[in-house]
Image (spheres, grey):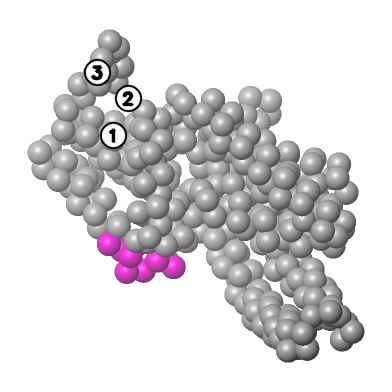
Amino acid sequence: MADSLILFSFFLLFLILLKVSPFILGAVVIGFYLSIVLDVPAKYLSKKMNPKLSKFLSYTLLLSLIFYSAVSFFPIVFSEGKKLFLELTNITIPVNSNLPKWILEFINSANQQISNFALNILNKIFSYTPSIITMTILIIITTIAVANLKEYLKKRINFFFIQDKERGYKFVKKFYRDFEKFVSGQVIIALFVGIMVGIFSWIFGIKGAFFLGTLSFITDFIPFLGVIIVSIPMLMLGYSSLGIKGIVISILILITVNQIESWILAPKIQSDNFNIHWFVLIISILIFGDIFGFIGILIAIPSLLFIKRYWVEYILGGKRWEKPGKNLKNS
């Protein structure tokens, strides 16, 4: 009983600290998340080459893609957005139009105000670029540190338990395996999403196809917000490349890829990794996001996995889950 209280106390303490210090602990969470993401291709490559070399190649490749996406995002949004809104500024309705004069003046004035407002926002975003780059470097450093920290904790995890150290170690090991399976599935899904967005963008002639594919891969790990982040530069690049037609094509690409992910990739790849209803997953993501912000979206599903594993191991005593007409093995 003491071990179960210790575990749950650590979980609550983690949530409290995340709320009090979201930036520092958030960097640790992202670093932990990315360290597992980086290990996924390393495990596949280790079957073909030396494990240390495979880990080095995996870390170098994925961290380079993350850094490339981060440092390219704001300059592209700024430059393409500036072009777009400068064009909007130059659009005026002829005075000899059939519309009343006061409507013409209102439309032209509103158009000018909207364009100036948008340009001010873009300038402000651009001013934050150095901070974003610094944060990206901090996350990369944290990722490498957390990867080493995992090995340190693995050897000392028994010290956190009092009554049954072996059971506690097995709990942590199973929870980590659950989370690792979830992340592994997300890596495969994100890879497909990135490839599809990149290929479709290239086929239809949208500029920055490689950047859009890479950004789609990186941001696909962020539920809901990922597609919004990608849509900003994609719509701008679509308009810059093909005009209004490019915006329509960009929207169709995003919708098509999102539907393929939601209805084909995610259910097929993640079906064996969860035994949690999809509605519970969505509500949990929304609640955690509302309480903890951006980081809450990332920890929602891992928290559910922890609670599920805790319930099975310490409340049910490791007993089997049973459904009507079907027995389920230990999770």
Between the residue at mark 3 and the residue at mark 2, the CA separation in whole angstroms equals 11 Å
Q: Residue 24: horizontal and vertical position, in percent?
A: 42, 66
Between the residue at mark 1 and the residue at mark 2, the CA separation in whole angstroms equals 8 Å
Instruction: Tell me if mark 1 has few (under 14), some (14-19) or many (20+) residues whose alpha carbon lies within 10 angstroms of its own.
Output: many
Who is closer to the viewer here, 238 or 319? 238
Q: Say if mark 1 contacts mark 2, CB within 8 Å.
A: yes
For label 2, the residue is 331
Residue 112 visible at all: no
Instruction: Tell me if mark 2 has few (under 14), some (14-19) or many (20+) residues whose alpha carbon lies within 10 angstroms of its own.
Output: some
N-terminal-most mark, 1 or 2: 1
Residue at 63%, 34% in the rendered image: 260
Who is closer to the viewer here, 84 or 77? 84
Q: Which mark is residue 322?
A: 3
Residue at 73%, 67% in the rendered image: 77
Q: Quadrant of residue 317?
A: top left
Q: Residue 20: horizontal and vertical position, in percent?
A: 32, 69
N-terminal-most mark, 3 or 2: 3
What quarter of the picture does the C terminus occupy?
top left
Which residues make up the magenta segment? 16-23
Q: Residue 3: horizontal and vertical position, in percent?
A: 16, 41
**Is residue 18 on the magenta stretch?**
yes
Seen as rendered, the residue at the extreme left is: 1
Relative to 129, residue 287 above or below: above
